[in-house]
Image (tube, grey):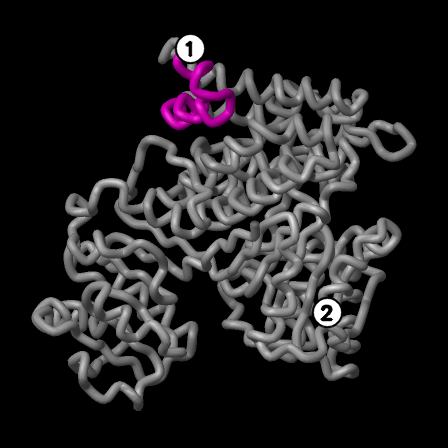
Amino acid sequence: MIREFKAAGTVLFGKAMAAQLVVEMEQQNVKKPVIIAQRGFEGRARKAGKLLTAGLYHSLDMIGEEGDHEPYDFLILAGGKSLTDRFRDDERQKAHFPLSPAHLEEISEPECQFLVIDNALINRRNIPEGFFRKYSRSLTGGLVLDSGEEIIPRTFAYHNRTVVSHGDSALEKLPEILSRRGVRKPLLLTDQGIVSAGLLDYVTKEMENRPFVLFSEIPSDSRIDIVNSIAELYKKEHCDGILAFGGGSVLDTGKGVWLNVSLDVEDLNRLAGSGFIPRLSIPFVAIPTTSGTGSEVTKVAVISDPERGRKMLFNSDNLQPDYAILDSRLTASLPPFLTSITGMDAMTHAVEAFTCIAKNPLSDQLAWTAISLLRDHLTAAVEDPSNLKHRRALAAASNLAGSAFSNSMVGLVHSIGHSVGAVCHAPHGSCMSVLLPPVLRYNKEVVKKDLARLLEAVAGKEVYDETPRDKRAERTIAELELYNMKLKELTGGRHPSKLSDIKNRDGGQLVREEDFEAIAETSLGDGSIIYNPVEARKKDILMILKECY
């Protein structure tokens, strides 16, 4: 069975979200929006119009359901399900403004690119119980598990524009996806490891004699010079879509090429940072071959610039691929050690998503489900690598964790982990495995309630029930430490449980105590640190490094 995860678009919730929609519309270059009011709700629709015109637009047309909406390029549907059903097949971008709790009760899945729940129209106290749990289930075709609690902050924004196909033969969806977007000659990006493993045949077999251009020399660290040369190849060969097939480096390289050819820029440096990237029109399909980074749904790309001696971070909702294909067969040959560290990378994404300050009820549900899937399938996949049931579960877990942290963000585990990687060239998944428990212990007093809740997802309901309430947070951390020890045993000692365990291919130690000062200094400048629930100073980071050495 192939399960499809729906693109949620953007969910804006809380105070002044109508004004936030105006910002989103400006970024989408909307020129002539219109409010379409459901019959009987014209008064409340006018109120929505006033909220919008208090933002960027000085005036905004409002028409009824039967009015002439043809001149407009963006439809703001003010009402309930009957109104969104009426315009379901309209290809223009649309925003849905429910005007009452009853309208929210009718919503069972994403209807428009934007769902706007403004506190001035629907008070947060009147949100139907379990609304966001129901909504999150619809995004994954029912895969999401119920975390048992729904904590709704005053304001949040959730974004996911990627449609995901997930299953043991999900690549069968590729021809349909390419035809749907009118792609006749895609550029296929991969690396030599994928070619040598024989995995490329899975993709090329599904191309249905469609011509394509192959670039298979992507290095293990995505680089700006490679991105630029591939972009030239794309233009020279007159390609009309991009397929990125591989691990994190391939997917990041694909995103860089996507930026280059979509915006026709010579220097990607001017787009580095956050929020400077417009909507990209060239079709982009991400096909991951590991289950860890979640890059196929994240809004981030990291690309090295060797000339400047730094890594460029690109961060925008518009960097989320159009489509992602999670085919269980592609990870079945992943060695036990790579399975273990990529799995703990996904675990870290999910745990930090659940405990960092930008969390929201949708990211909570996805993170909870990811952790539960990893609990039941990570060690099993390491023990039985060819088992597609476990591989399918890990692919889903990585994807859900990626969606969760791309919205809630990550914290100090990633700040320190990025820095260990930059200073010592240590594998990212290994850093995440080692750093997760000590950073959680550092954060524990502030996130004790969240950590206690997570015990059920991390260790199961029986362990949760038998553990005294005041011991659950610490038990969660202990169980994650046990994961590392179990994975270390299953991989013959290759999976690290402390920083001194992280080795290069020749068995040499990568992280040394004399590196700690540089790691700590670098961590303080990492963007993830601002989302950590506890402020961290240099001395705190040094303490954590010593604890897990």
Q: What residue do we see at 44% from left, 26% from top?
A: 454
Q: How many marks?
A: 2
Check disc 1 and report its element: helix, strand or loop. Answer: loop
One can see residue 520 in this view: no
Furthest residue in direction front, as rendered: 1
Crowding at mark 2 (Cα within 10 Å: few <14, some 14-19, many 20+):
some
Judged left or right of residue 88, residue 255 is: right
Asked whether 298 or 141 is in front, the reply is 141
Point out residue 354 in the picture as x, y percentages from the top left corner: 44, 36
Q: What residue do we see at 31% from left, 85% from top?
A: 72
Judged left or right of residue 269, residue 460 is: left
Crowding at mark 1 (Cα within 10 Å: few <14, some 14-19, many 20+):
some
Name which quarter of the figure residue 157 lies in: bottom left
Name which quarter of the figure residue 453 lies in: top left
Position of 261 relative to 80 (above/below): below
Instruction: Tell me where the magenta segment starts and ends, as one range.
Output: 446-466
As shown in the figure, which amino acid type bears the numbered disc 2?
Met
- The quadrant the C terminus occupies is top right
Check disc 2 and report its element: helix, strand or loop. Answer: helix
The earlier-in-sequence mark between 2 and 1 is: 2
Q: Could you tell me what secondary structure mostly forms the magenta stretch?
A: helix
Asked whether 377 or 537 is in front, the reply is 377
Point out residue 133 in the picture as x, y percentages from the top left corner: 33, 42
Q: Which mark is residue 467?
A: 1
As shown in the figure, which amino acid type bears the numbered disc 1?
Thr
Circle 2 residue: 207
